[in-house]
Amino acid sequence: MHHCVTLFSIFLLIASSWTDKHQVTASSPSVLYVWSGQDSSVSNAADFVAVIDFDEMSPTYGHILKTVSIVSNTANGIKQVGNEPHHSAISADGRYYITGGLLSFRSQKKEVFVWKITKNIAEGPKFLYALDAPGACPDEFLPIGGPEFDVTMMCNEQAASPGNMVRINAKNRTAISILKNISAFIDFNPHGVGRLSNGSIFVSDFIEPISLAGTDPSQILFRNTVRHILPDGTLERTFQLQFPTTLGSSSGIGRGIGLIALQPIPGDPLGRSFVNGASVNNMYLIGPGMPKPILAIDFSQVNKYQQRISTGLLSIFPDGTRLLTTVQMRYVVLVNITRPEQPNILRVFDFCSDQALKHVTIGIPGSLKKTTFAAFCTQNNNIVGSHYIVHPKDENRFIVINYFLKFGLAQFSGTRTVHAFKFNKDFTNFEYDHKFNPNFQFDSSPIKKQRLTFHSLQAYPHHAQCLKGKKYKHSLRDYII
Ligand SMILES: *[C@@H]1O[C@H](CO)[C@@H](O)[C@H](O)[C@H]1NC(C)=O
Ligand SMILES: *[C@@H]1O[C@H](CO)[C@@H](O)[C@H](O)[C@H]1NC(C)=O
Ligand SMILES: *[C@@H]1O[C@H](CO)[C@@H](O)[C@H](O)[C@H]1NC(C)=O
Ligand SMILES: *[C@@H]1O[C@H](CO)[C@@H](O)[C@H](O)[C@H]1NC(C)=O
């Protein structure tokens, strides 16, 4: 579902279906588009897309090549800052890049931004138009074919239930609800979404956003439901998960599990998906033919079974053998899911204590002071904000972003950094990629050219797409001169 998009070439499409079966440890030249907010204290602040060099052979590997910003346009209902940049996706036809502003609705502005992917991908996307979709809080975009996307709208215009499920056609500029009868959707705040090959849709409910606007954390309302929606938009079934109430069995923040992420297992004949909890650190296995979801793994085991708030998205390999997730906004976890009912953890990386980060310097967001991950953890309740994780198709690297959300009671900015990791040959282990650093220029000196970093931009990076293509290599070299 999160693919490194291969552009304009049937040949490459054939090549990639071949590599699905024979996992190639290739590191392809490519760029990342990182959808990012900017602190409102920056003059003319604007939400933007950062274009990052993802070609390991390039002298500017891991650097921000340029940024492309949203520009305010009152007549068209566009506000350039404060949209809370959230998820993004690339259309199946490789022509459109789409990004969402989780909180654009608060200023009555359009919330979905549609961009054209240009031939020279290193030049970044070209902004086309903004859309006002039914509902509010756009969350996950799922490319479903051609120029179309399905998107979960986590709330209505009052930041409450029901949210919506919307189909966007980027080419004909439409956004329409796909739900047959929305009054059948009770306590509907969808976040995670997956689509089976026969068109069945699974969505998981996360949180009622308005409950974050109060002052009392015990009133935060996490959701406990997963829904199976038929291709025609009819609600086939609502699965109710059990929120455990015994002491220590949840993070203790608010009520409910908070089913933040859902992803189907590619090629699973039973059409099953994994679903990640937030306040209860469980990952569940759920499927259309199962009487009820089952507990697949308790991720709190990576932290001596202490339940902490966790906002891990999921990235599952196309062959269904491995899963990556972030846990408790500090750990990166690689899981063997060859037997989905009984996954086993292969590797745990801890941003707060891993030796690989001992000498890595980061800038304290919004300040000129430097720090280390360990010191940042000590001062920030061991939360670095790890949330988004993606393993681009046919890659031996993956991306983790340390930023979740800064809204009301959810103050989880973390280090506001973007990281790359590299797998070993059989995908049983990975290492931190020290060469990749779009975050902070720690080797700056008066004679060295200053470059753009997420720190210097005072950015809130949330989501990344990886793009690669035959035309890319030449054009990036051109760009670098
Ligand atoms: C736009 O696309 C949607 C499907 O995504 C379709 O229902 C609608 O008829 C199309 N509208 C136009 C004007 O082509
Ligand atoms: C829509 O859903 C409501 C609530 O489940 C139900 O009472 C009603 O009959 C449904 N309407 C249609 C047209 O299916
Ligand atoms: C889609 O496939 C799954 C798994 O094979 C099945 O359980 C489900 O009922 C199917 N949905 C439809 C709409 O046919
Ligand atoms: C992954 O799980 C399968 C099934 O349990 C097992 O046979 C295989 O050895 C595991 N691989 C690793 C690397 O742990």
Image (cartoon, helix red, strand yellow):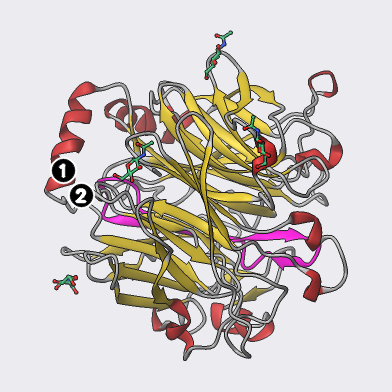
Residue at the (36%, 27%) spot, across then down: 475
Q: Alpha-carbon neighbours of circle 1 within 10 Å: few (<14), some, or many (≥20)?
A: some
Q: Alpha-carbon neighbours of circle 2 within 10 Å: few (<14), some, or many (≥20)?
A: few
Relative to 470, say whether 192 is above or below: below
- Residue 72, percent from left and from top: 79, 29
Q: In the picture, residue 337 is in which quadrant?
A: bottom left
Q: Which residues are magenta?
A: 391-417
* CB-based contact (under 8 Å), mark 2 and mark 1: yes
Find disc 2 in the rendering and name its residue: 26
Front-most of 346 and 434? Answer: 346
Query: Which quarter of the figure is the C terminus placed in?
Result: top left
Tell me: 107 left or right of 24: right
Residue at the (67%, 70%) spot, across then down: 364
Q: How many numbered dots are placed on residues in this image?
A: 2
Residue at the (58%, 50%) spot, across then down: 191
Front-most of 38 and 128? Answer: 128
Query: Which quarter of the figure is the N terminus placed in?
Result: top left
Q: Would you say residue 440 is visible in this rendering? A: no
Q: Would you say residue 162 is visible in this rendering? A: yes
Mark 2: secondary structure: loop
Q: In the picture, residue 448 is in which quadrant?
A: bottom right
Foreground tag (2 vs 1)? 1
Amino acid marked by disc 2: Ala
- Residue 227, percent from left and from top: 52, 49
- Residue 206, percent from left and from top: 62, 58
Find disc 1 in the rendering and name its residue: 19
Mark 1: secondary structure: helix
